[in-house]
Amino acid sequence: MIVAIDGPAGSGKSTVARALAAREGFVYLDTGAMYRAVTLKVLKAQVPVAETAQVAKLAQEAVIEFVPGVPGEAPQVMLDGKDVTAAIRTAQIDQNVSAVASVPAVRQAMVAQQRAVAKNIDIVAEGRDMGTVVFPDAQVKVFLSADAAARAWRRTIEREGGNAAQPGAQVKDQALYESVLKDIQSRDAQDEANAASPLHPAADATLLDSTRMTPQQVVDAIANLVALAQARQAATASDNAAAAQSSVAEKGAPSQPASSQAAPAASGPDASKAKATGAKAPKTKPGQAPMKPFHNTFDDYYDHGMREFPLPARCVFNVAAGLIYGFSRLYWPWDYEGGQQLIDELKERELGTVMVMNHVSMVEPVITVVMFWRQGLRIRPVFKQEFNKNDLMRWVFSRVGGIPVDRGTADLKAVRRCQRALKRGESILIYPEGTRIRDDDGKAPIHGGFALIAQMAKTDVTPSAVIGVRDVTPEGAHIPRPHRVHFKVGAPLKFGALGVKGRKAQLEAMEAKAMDKVFELRAQLRRDYPGEW
């Protein structure tokens, strides 16, 4: 897999790329360092940048290597056998690298080396044209930007030996900051005017503005894109395998002899019958074997339908849901605009829906679960795996039908569990923001796996929004307070109505449209109930 991160100077590409590569176990390809190394070679040779033929010759002769260092840190950069890691990060290199990199022959030499490195390994490549020129077929493309002032601030702190990611970091030398800002603005103009490869995002790149994001938030956002791309690859591979098997069956290919097939392990009545008759016992799939009255595993609860839960668990859920329903109606008087229409539609069909909503408090999933319960339906919230570190939380989430997801990874187990639940008629509740957002803008990087889940289950996505819950648990409060809560549900969004073809294009279109609708619904609620958040 190739992850291509592009963006202007100082946007944080290198920091993010290194951290992402360490997190995912990918190789970090610092393409910017390659151009800086060539620039250093040119300056040391005292060759004018305008002498493009001589510059190109030096680039072609340059031997650039990366020596891995401490995990998560930048590798050591070697130029013609010498360590130039520090030498390529000076102001003089900053001022000349764009001009050197704009020489077509230099770019050709570097691109050839970069593509050769990426042939057989997973890489994270950062630069200025990774997604547009070097790796146009990269599975993940990101264009990382930030305003010039923020980029100059970060780079100045780095030059002063500080860490811009540390809270409270400050610029010490204002004159240096002004100089760096001027250089960045000048380089931006050069990059945009570069005829060989102007700086711009790829058409299919995800745009991220890091001005007010921490490096970790940026890494989390890109890691989610990686996980989604991995899940898509796995789904495509699965579909291709199924299609191949179907094709073989249609052609009448002979099946494998029984003697060459290994007998899968199984238990229960089918296994006993198979043993008595000498037949092969079928393999039990997740959620297939009936649950026991007691002593089931957490995986049993995640894999089975909620109506298949053992009687004691269903009794506990029903009693708790009834009490919470009554309490919530009195303590947080809530209304669910559009909810009844959705419920009526779900009762008339076999498949559940994937409901997506903005996330402000733990109150909104509780109300949504009991609202569905009151109508005789079940909705299963998807929750982050971190909650399972607490035994009590893990027990509660499993009994209310929650499905854990390991964020930042291609958690196909969670995707398949959601897919099976939807096909059983249960709905899925997902918060694509991945965490509670409590500011007035209320937007964060989106974890887009919800579209893949809906697509695999051949169902729709229902956007919804909530306001009023921020005042239920204001900052500093540990006990929820009484306050009115308002929900609004939009019409289900169907893949066939998106007007695009192709699995990947449909997923991207669904993710964008669904979240746009969520924020539109939230804005409508705020207009209807001024002052509520």
Image (cartoon, rainbow, N blue to C red):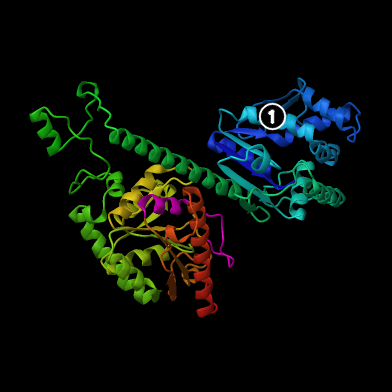
The stretch drawn in magenta includes residue 448: yes
How would you rate the neighbour count of disc 1 (Cα within 10 Å): few for under 14, some for 14-19, many for 20 or more?
few
- SS for tag 1? helix
Q: Nearer the viewer, residue 143 or 483?
A: 143
Q: Amino acid at mark 1?
A: Ala
Q: Residue at x 49, y 43 (%)?
A: 227
* Residue 433 visible (yes or no): no
State left or right for residue 167 relative to residue 233: right
* Residue 63 visible (yes or no): yes
State left or right for residue 154 relative to residue 124: right
State left or right for residue 263 relative to residue 116: left
- Give the quadrant of the N terminus: top right
Residue 40 screen position, x and y as percent:
83, 30
Q: Residue at x 52, y 47 (%)?
A: 224
Number of numbered callouts drawn: 1
Q: Nearer the viewer, residue 323 or 39?
A: 39
Q: Quadrant of the rendered structure where residue 424 is?
A: bottom left
Q: Residue at x 83, y 50 (%)?
A: 177
The residue indicated by pointer 1 is 112
In the rendered image, the vertical position of residue 394 relative to residue 83, given as above or below: below
Q: Residue at x 43, y 63 (%)?
A: 493
Looking at the rendering, the stretch of residues picked out in magenta corresponds to: 437-458
The stretch drawn in magenta includes residue 446: yes
Residue 111 screen position, x and y as percent:
70, 32
Residue 490 screen position, x and y as percent:
43, 69
Residue 427 screen position, x and y as percent:
34, 59
